[in-house]
Structures are given as C-alpha cells and as structure tokens.
Image: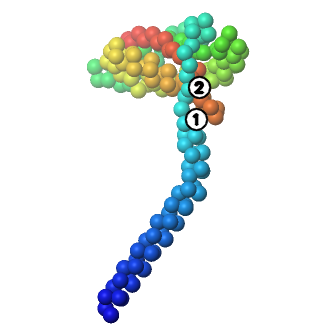
C-alpha cells in the first residue's frame, strides 16, 4: 500500500513538471515574434556603410578651415601646453552627388556640435599624448566615430556619413 502512495506522488510530480514545461514552451512560441522585432530594432541602431568612390565624397572644414587653439590636459612637465588643430572631414554625398545639398544642410546644422566634440576630445589629451603618432591615429578613428554618432543622432536608420577625418595637430 505504501508503494502505491509513492508511485502516486511520483506520477503527480512528473505530471506537474510536464504541464509546467508545456506552459513554458507555449509562452516561448507566443512571445518569440515580439522578441524578433526587438532584435531588428537593435540591428538598425548599427551604422551601415557602403564603398564610396572619391567623386562621391565632399570635403568640409571645421572651424572655417582655420587652425584652432586648444588647451591640453595638465601635465607636470608641460603645465601650459596647447595644441593647434585643424580638422577636415570627407562625407558621402550619395551616388552622382544627389544628396550633396542634404549633407551640406546636415553639416551646417551640426557644425557647433562637431566642433565642440573636437574641443572635448583635446581637453582630455596631454602634451605627451598629442606628440605621439599612435595617439593621432587613434584620435582620427575616435573622431570619425564621434562625428558619425552626432550626425546620426536623430535618425532611425543610421548610415555612415563621415568616411575620413583629416587631423593636423601641432602641440606646443
């Protein structure tokens, strides 16, 4: 008699676990389409890019094409160090330059944010870092990413707009 009670308890545990598994599987199948939509939204936040020929790139100079003086981060060996910086960017204006006016307006609209990003970047750089050639390459790559993020800030589908940053740094 005691054996029948144990078997009944084991069967009821197995039945409850089977029902719980079935409910979990049904829940996953019902909620899967909504999770698929969330993944699509995440993928859209990445910046898409294309291979751009030279004749589809337009050059824009920040700071009206002039060198700008930035105070560098304090360093004991060089307490009052500055850097003369000039920045130009090359942007994709589309096939047959069909988006040139749109890109001109976008750059004009965000010029102050782009220039501020350059200032913020150099405010965190020391004189020794500014003299290092590897830091210059890193600065170009970082500013390229920062500029694209600024220009794509209010867009649902993000695309690479800035393809090249030319940066001249003269630390003093």
* Local secondary structure at mark 2: loop
Q: CA distance from mark 1 to mark 2?
A: 10 Å
Q: Which labelled disc corresponds to residue 59?
A: none
Q: Quadrant of residue 46?
A: top right
Find disc 2 in the rendering and name its residue: 159
- Judge whether 25 appears above or below 15 on screen: above
Q: Secondary structure at mark 1?
A: helix
User: What percent of the width, then of the height, locates residue 40?
Assistant: 58, 40
Q: Nearer the viewer, residue 22 or 104?
A: 22
Q: Which residue is mark 1?
A: 44
Q: Is residue 113 left or right of residue 73?
A: right
| Residue occupying image coordinates x 47% and y 12% | 167
Q: Residue at x 62, y 31 (%)?
A: 157
Cβ–Cβ under 8 Å for marks 1 and 2:
no
Mark with earlier residue (1, 2)? 1
Q: Quadrant of residue 89?
A: top right
Quarter of the rendering containing residue 123: top left
The quadrant of the rendering that contains the C terminus is top left
Give the left or right position of residue 41, taking residue 71 as reference: right
């Amino acid at each position: 008699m005691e054996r029948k009670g144990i078997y009944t308890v084991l069967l009821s545990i197995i039945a409850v676990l089977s029902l719980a598994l079935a409910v979990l599987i049904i829940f996953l199948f019902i909620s899967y389409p909504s999770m698929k939509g969330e993944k699509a939204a995440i993928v859209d936040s990445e910046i898409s890019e294309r291979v751009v020929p030279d004749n589809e790139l337009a050059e824009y100079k920040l700071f009206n094409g002039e060198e700008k003086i930035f105070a560098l981060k304090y360093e004991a060996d060089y307490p009052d160090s500055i850097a003369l910086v000039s920045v130009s960017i090359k942007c994709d204006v589309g096939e047959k330059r069909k988006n040139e006016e749109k890109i001109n307006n976008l750059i004009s609209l965000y010029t102050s944010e782009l220039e501020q990003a350059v200032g913020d970047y150099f405010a965190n750089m020391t004189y020794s870092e500014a003299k290092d050639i590897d830091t210059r390459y890193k600065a170009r790559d970082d500013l390229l990413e920062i500029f694209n993020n600024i220009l794509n800030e209010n867009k649902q589908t993000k695309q690479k707009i800035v393809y090249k940053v030319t940066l001249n740094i003269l630390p003093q």
